[in-house]
Amino acid sequence: MVSRPLVLAFTKIESSRMSFFTEELFHWLLEHEESCWLDFKREIHSNKDKDELLKDILALANADHQSDRYLLFGIEDGNKKEIGLDLKETWLKKEENFLSWFRKCTFNHRPSVQFKFLSFEDKLFACLRIENQPYKPYFSTKDNTNDNHIIWTREDHTNQKADDGDMQRMWRERFGLDKSIKERFFLYLEDFENWTQTDDQFGCFYYNDFPEFTLVGDLEKDNANWEHTWTKKTAFPDKRISLSRWQFKYHTTLIESIWILGADGDRHKIPFPKSAQINKGDLDSLYRWYFSKESNSYKLALFFHNRVPSDINYHPHYSFESILKLTNLPIKD
């Protein structure tokens, strides 16, 4: 097994563009006590205590919790009294100040965070949300803290150094070892750059970190020019659609078999759409076709799109959803 950790997505560091910190969230957080995922602060850390702020972020990011984590500023620790913030003496007067500092911090993998102020009843509060992602353990790597390479986590309402049990939990989550074989398959598909294609078949891929996970394709001759009622209405220049079957295998065990379409003369892989019956009980019932983001066919088609992005010179709108819109079929979450 190679030691390179699973990396699935770009890190987000956002502020005022996000409207996550609402009055509803503010009141919801105050309904809870401090815990492994929630920390109240009377005031924002001073300039000389930025190391402590970084430690708080890392501890929350590494905590054993299945959802996002929050730091709420302007709340009295213990009694949850709504004190509010006075920004006259603090370095963090604007949301951009936090983002500028956080971007300069160095990590093994940067946590995805959002920071925002909120004015409520003539008082100012701030909230830092840390997204729950499977990249644990997070730790600092350079001179932005006195505790470089120490793994911090959070137990109840207290920051603490991770023990062996914590480390096992975090690494199992990072490599997907806490999931079923099928769940791991679709998790690894998101790590699209870490798959290798072999040249001995129509399509065969294996996952570099765990080569026992393979993806094998089969294009049958009878399906090279597949047609359906909706395929003739697409906006693709080339109306030809191919149909191929892809097998998800773990060692020699077949985990799942998925159908996928090759659109526009096989330039783009698109999901096999789902259908919903409109008129029940009628042999001539109508069906409404659509793409479901939750379908495994959608996830597989997205894998192919990410590996070989559409040519920007071929079509100006080359995002995955833009390509799907050329089918004139709706996309549902």
Image (cartoon, rainbow, N blue to C red):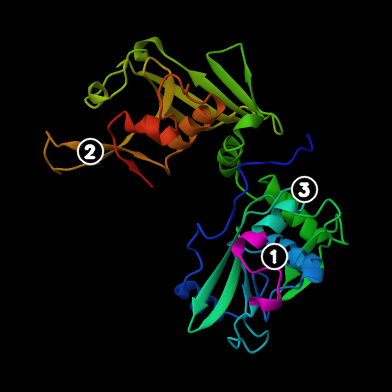
To which quarter of the image does residue 241 belong?
top left
To which quarter of the image does residue 123 belong?
bottom right
- State which mark lies toward you, 2 or 3: 3
Disc 3 is placed on an element classified as loop
Disc 1 is placed on an element classified as helix
Q: Are marks 1 and 2 in contact (CB under 8 Å)?
A: no
Circle on res. 5: none
Q: Which label's residue is closer to the chain start, 3 or 1?
A: 1
Amino acid type at circle 2 is: Arg
Mark 1 Cα within 10 Å, few/some/many (few <14, many 20+)? many
Mark 3 Cα within 10 Å, few/some/many (few <14, many 20+)? some
Disc 2 is placed on an element classified as strand
The answer for how far apart the CA atoms under marks 1 and 2 are is 45 Å
Q: Residue 146 location in percent, x, y? A: 88, 62
Dot 3 corresponds to which residue?
108
The answer for how far apart the CA atoms under marks 2 and 3 are is 47 Å
244 vs 155: above or below = above
Mark 2 Cα within 10 Å, few/some/many (few <14, many 20+)? few
130 vs 326: above or below = below
Taking the spot 70% from the left edge, 33% from the top edge, the residue there is 210
Taking the spot 51% from the left edge, 20% from the top edge, the residue there is 217
- The reply to whether residue 31 is visible in this rendering is no
Q: Which residues are magenta?
A: 87-98
Q: Which label's residue is closer to the chain start, 2 or 3?
A: 3
Left or right relative to 203: residue 332: left
Q: Residue 242 location in percent, x, y? A: 37, 17
Dot 2 corresponds to which residue?
288
